[in-house]
């Protein structure tokens, strides 16, 4: 059934591209490598993969089917499934998480745009330490990064105003293949650098002794963040799905593509980190310091690759950021009855302002430390990714498994699935037991109760 007022995805591949576009972003190329580096490498990667399969894919199926069945934003969706209950609060938490995430996400995306134009500076810098200088000089300056952050927000607002089909789908379809090709070329360069072997060992040889409770929670948060789960994003995107779409198959495609790209990004970054004498634990700057060193080592062609790479990274960030802004806007469009333009502009401007402290926290406000010695940006990311998203996912699972019922969910999810892959007892078991219990234990373990 066509939904004329809210819009629908034009084609199936268009939806997958858009949902994968939401999933694939800075989370894969900026965050996955640096978090993996901070929490010890290969063991972290294995735990991450387990969480994707056992926890996140069931959550993705659940969010998509809730969205498609109700055709609503996250708050409206929960209200429709069980009217007059408090479950809509889960949706509201998601809208709030989207708000917070986009505020700092846009700051990092601003760095990516700026780096499209900084090729002169990083090509002239040597390896390692000098690249770190170029980066730190830029992000600590009080004005330029905020201007880029603003430019990024305006682009996203423009696309969200254009609407689901015309905006989101069109931009998502072209990007992914290009990004994969570029990553593959960069992997070849990176693993052939002298000293790359140590990086490969760090990334691929697990040492579980290095994995802390903090690291396990970070892996969970990263899995949710990277797959755009736990905040109603996939509910919102699912609400634009036509009834004949195959939800379980689409979930596998989206999760598979996202995980593959994160994994490939690690294969570019870690060999280079070791080859250039950098520290894998460097934190949020890791990608922005390491990749320019790779480009600089490639000569003239590296210059070209650098420009293309940061351009693609920017587009990947845009397709993710618009999904965040879409969640927030869809809420105000449906529930507060604002028009699309008003919702996107007002929320976009508020989110921009909220992001300013994250940018200043790199330089003039770098003394401000909030959670466990983290700066403003990292603290917001910690709260949103490691607490809000897994909690949102946990509550969604409890809702489906124990309140609304997996029978109804399976029926709703399988509608339109003609293929061999359908939701069944495996899904039900994961949703009711494995996934929520795992999240619960990880939380307890982090606060030291386990
Ligand atoms: N998944 C996106 C990324 O990896 C970020 C995101 C998180 C988007 C949550 C939407 C919702 O970059």
Image: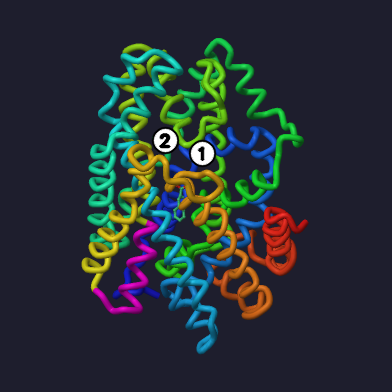
From mark 1 to mark 2, how far is it between C-alphas?
Answer: 9 Å
User: What residue did someone put label 1 on?
Assistant: 261
Left or right: 109, with 64 as reference point: left
User: What residue did someone put label 2 on?
Assistant: 179
**Residue 93 lies in the magenta stretch:** no
Q: Position of residue 191 (x, y in %)?
A: 55, 18
Marks 1 and 2 in Cβ contact (< 8 Å): yes
Specify whether residue 315 is in view.
no
Q: Position of residue 188 (x, y in %)?
A: 51, 20
Q: Which residues are magenta?
A: 323-338
Q: Position of residue 57 (x, y in %)?
A: 61, 57
Q: How many marks?
A: 2
Above or below, 216 against 89 in this view is: above
Judged from the image, the secondary structure of the residue bearing numbered disc 2 is helix
Q: Is mark 1 within 8 Å of ligand 1?
A: no
Q: Which mark is residue 34?
A: none
Question: Which residue is at a point 36% across and 18% down the rendered structure image?
Answer: 302
Q: Nearer the viewer, residue 318 or 110?
A: 110
Give the residue furthest to the bottom. 84
Above or below, 439 against 370 in this view is: below
Q: Position of residue 267 (x, y in %)?
A: 56, 28
């Amino acid at each position: 059934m066509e939904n004329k007022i809210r819009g629908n995805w034009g084609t199936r591949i268009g939806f997958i591209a858009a949902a994968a576009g939401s999933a694939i972003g800075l989370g894969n190329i900026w965050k996955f490598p640096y978090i993996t580096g901070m929490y010890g490498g290969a063991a972290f990667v294995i735990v991450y993969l387990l969480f994707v399969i056992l926890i996140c894919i069931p959550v993705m199926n659940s969010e998509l089917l809730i969205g498609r069945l109700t055709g609503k934003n996250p708050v409206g969706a929960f209200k429709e499934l069980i009217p007059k209950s408090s479950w809509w609060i889960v949706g509201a938490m998601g809208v709030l998480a989207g708000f917070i995430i986009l505020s700092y996400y846009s700051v990092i995306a601003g760095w990516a745009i700026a780096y499209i134009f900084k090729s002169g500076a990083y090509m002239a810098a040597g390896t390692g330490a000098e690249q770190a200088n170029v980066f730190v000089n830029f992000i600590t300056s009080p004005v330029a990064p905020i201007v880029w952050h603003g430019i990024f927000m305006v682009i996203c607002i423009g696309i969200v105003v254009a609407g689901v089909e015309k905006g989101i789908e069109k931009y998502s379809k072209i990007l992914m293949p290009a990004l994969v090709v570029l990553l593959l070329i960069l992997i070849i360069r990176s693993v052939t650098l002298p000293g790359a072997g140590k990086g490969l060992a760090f990334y691929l040889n697990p040492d579980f002794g290095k994995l802390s409770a903090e690291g396990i929670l970070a892996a969970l948060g990263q899995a949710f963040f990277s797959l755009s789960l736990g905040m109603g994003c996939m509910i919102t995107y699912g609400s634009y799905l036509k009834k004949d779409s195959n939800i379980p198959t689409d979930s596998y495609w989206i999760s598979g593509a996202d995980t593959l790209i994160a994994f490939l990004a690690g294969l570019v970054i870690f060999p280079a980190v070791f080859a250039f004498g950098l520290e894998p634990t460097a934190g949020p700057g890791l990608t922005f310091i390491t990749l320019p060193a790779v480009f600089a080592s490639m000569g003239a062609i590296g210059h070209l690759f650098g420009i293309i790479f940061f351009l693609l990274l920017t587009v990947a960030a845009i397709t993710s950021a618009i999904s965040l802004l879409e969640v927030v806007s869809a809420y105000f469009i449906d529930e507060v009855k604002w028009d699309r333009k008003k919702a996107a502009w007002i929320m976009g401007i508020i989110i921009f302002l909220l992001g300013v402290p994250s940018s200043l926290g790199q330089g003039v406000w770098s003394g401000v430390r909030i959670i466990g010695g983290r700066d403003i940006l990292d603290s917001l990311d910690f709260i949103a990714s490691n607490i809000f998203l897994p909690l949102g996912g946990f509550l969604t699972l409890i809702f489906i498994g124990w309140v609304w019922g997996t029978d109804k969910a399976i029926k709703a999810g399988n509608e339109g699935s003609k293929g061999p892959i359908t939701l069944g007892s495996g899904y039900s078991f994961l949703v009711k037991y494995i996934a929520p219990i795992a999240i619960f234990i990880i939380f307890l373990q982090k606060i030291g109760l386990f």
